[in-house]
Amino acid sequence: MNRLFDTDAPKKATNLSLNSDLLSKSRALNINLSATLEQALQARLAEANSGKWAAENRSAIRAYNEFVEEHGCFGEEYKEF
């Protein structure tokens, strides 16, 4: 499976600017800021890569959909549902 990033890469300290009220309330709830940011960045990276893949494969997807419209889905005659 192609990973989005190297999960074994070392951690790196980073300075961020955050809304002070958001930070206070997050800390009060013991929210792990590093883990939360990593999860959010991973989701955004996956979203960006998904969009890039769809754009790169747009013509193949269109051609496949046109084929299915014209000829039906492969194995349709064997489908029991």
Image (spheres, rainbow, N blue to C red):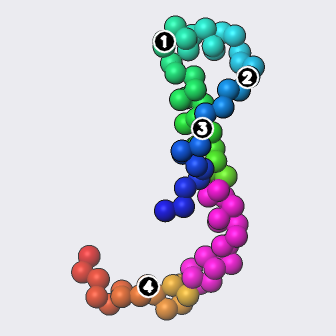
Of residues 23 and 13, which is closer to you in this image?
A: 13
Place of residue 47 in the rendered image (x, y in percent of width and height, measured from the top left): 62, 50
Mark 3 or mark 4: name the one nearer the start of the chain: 3
Kind of residue sitting beneath label 1: Leu
Instruction: Mark 3 and mark 1 in contact? Answer it, CB < 8 Å.
Output: no
Q: Is residue 6 visible?
A: yes
Q: Furthest residue to the left?
A: 80
Q: Which residue is mark 1?
A: 29
Mark 2 or mark 4: name the one nearer the start of the chain: 2
- Label number found at residue 10: 3
Crowding at mark 3 (Cα within 10 Å: few <14, some 14-19, many 20+): few
Mark 3 or mark 1: name the one nearer the start of the chain: 3
Label 1 residue SS: loop
- Label number found at residue 75: none
Kind of residue sitting beneath label 4: Cys
Between label 4 and label 1, give the one nearer the viewer.
Answer: 1
Mark 4 or mark 1: name the one nearer the start of the chain: 1
| Res 2 quadrant in image | bottom right
Q: Which residue is mark 2?
A: 16
- How far, Cα to Cα, is label 4 from label 1? 51 Å
- How far, Cα to Cα, is label 3 from label 4? 47 Å
Please report the residue visible at 61 percent of the width from the left and 8 percent of the height from the top.
Answer: 24
Confirm whether the magenta stretch covers residue 54.
Answer: yes
Between label 2 and label 3, give the one nearer the viewer.
Answer: 3
- How far, Cα to Cα, is label 2 from label 4? 51 Å
Please report the residue visible at 26 percent of the width from the left and 76 percent of the height from the top.
Answer: 81
Confirm whether the magenta stretch covers residue 60.
Answer: yes
Please report the residue visible at 49 percent of the width from the left and 92 percent of the height from the top.
Answer: 71
Q: Which residue is mark 4?
A: 73
